[in-house]
Each structure stands twice: as structure tokens, then as C-alpha cells.
Image (cartoon, grey):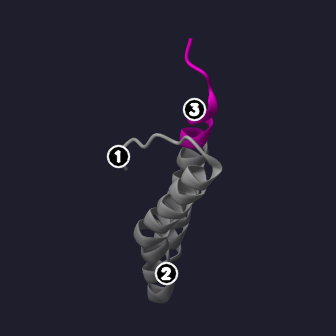
Amino acid sequence: MDPRIVDSRDDFAQWAIDRTNAILTDQGSNLATASRRGDEAQTRETAHALGQAIVDALLEAFDGLVCEE
């Protein structure tokens, strides 16, 4: 995602909505497809990728809160 300046609570809420939508579109659909196929190894791998995408988004949000000096 492109960097975004967050100056208000509304900006942060919109960033969170956009980021969540991107994660679910990419990773969530991969997980659903793997689950439908019944491939346990692929389901595990895509579930891990979904979890990592969530962690990455949380770290991205945290990094945006840290003041640069």
C-alpha cells in the first residue's frame, strides 16, 4: 500500500478499513480457495500468510505511531 499521512482518528479509521480490505481480498480469498480444495498443507500455508499479513499491518500501524526524532 502507498504511504498515507494520518492526521486524525478518521484518517486512521479509513486506513484501517482500506488495509483490512486489502488483506481479506488477497489473503482471505487464498485461504478460502485452499480450504475448498481440501489441501491441508496449502490451507496451513495460506492461513500462516494471512496471519503474517495481519501482523505486518499491526507493525505498520505501530511504526506510524512512533515519533521520529
Give whichever of 26, 38 is nearer the camera.
26
What's the residue at 43%, 43% (across, down)?
A: 4
Q: Which residue is mark 2?
A: 32
Amino acid type, residue under disc 2 in the picture: Ala
What's the residue at 54%, 40% (across, down)?
A: 60
Q: Which mark is residue 63?
A: 3
Residue 45 appearing in the image: no
- Is the magenta region chiefly helix, strand or loop? helix
Q: Which residues are magenta?
A: 59-69
Q: Nearer the viewer, mark 2 or mark 3?
A: 3
Q: Which quarter of the rendering shows the C terminus?
A: top right
User: How many marks do you count on the picture?
Assistant: 3
Left or right: 51 as drawn, with respect to 30: right
Q: Which residue is mark 1?
A: 2
Disc 3 to disc 1, C-alpha distance: 15 Å
Q: Quadrant of residue 22?
A: bottom left
Earlier sequence position, callout 2 versus callout 1: 1
Q: Position of residue 43 (x, y in %)?
A: 51, 72
Q: Position of residue 19 (x, y in %)?
A: 49, 58
Asked which secondary structure carries label 3, the reply is helix
For the residue carrying disc 2, how many other residues have a C-alpha within 10 Å: few (<14), some (14-19), or many (20+)?
Answer: some
Q: Which residue is the extreme one toward the bottom?
A: 36
Disc 2 to disc 3, C-alpha distance: 30 Å
Give whichever of 67, 9 is nearer the camera.
9
Amino acid type, residue under disc 3 in the picture: Asp
What's the residue at 47%, 62% (across, down)?
A: 18
Earlier sequence position, callout 3 versus callout 1: 1
Q: Position of residue 66 (x, y in %)?
A: 62, 26
Asked which secondary structure carries label 1, the reply is loop
Earlier sequence position, callout 2 versus callout 3: 2
Give whichever of 40, 19 is nearer the camera.
19
For the residue carrying disc 1, how many other residues have a C-alpha within 10 Å: few (<14), some (14-19), or many (20+)?
Answer: few
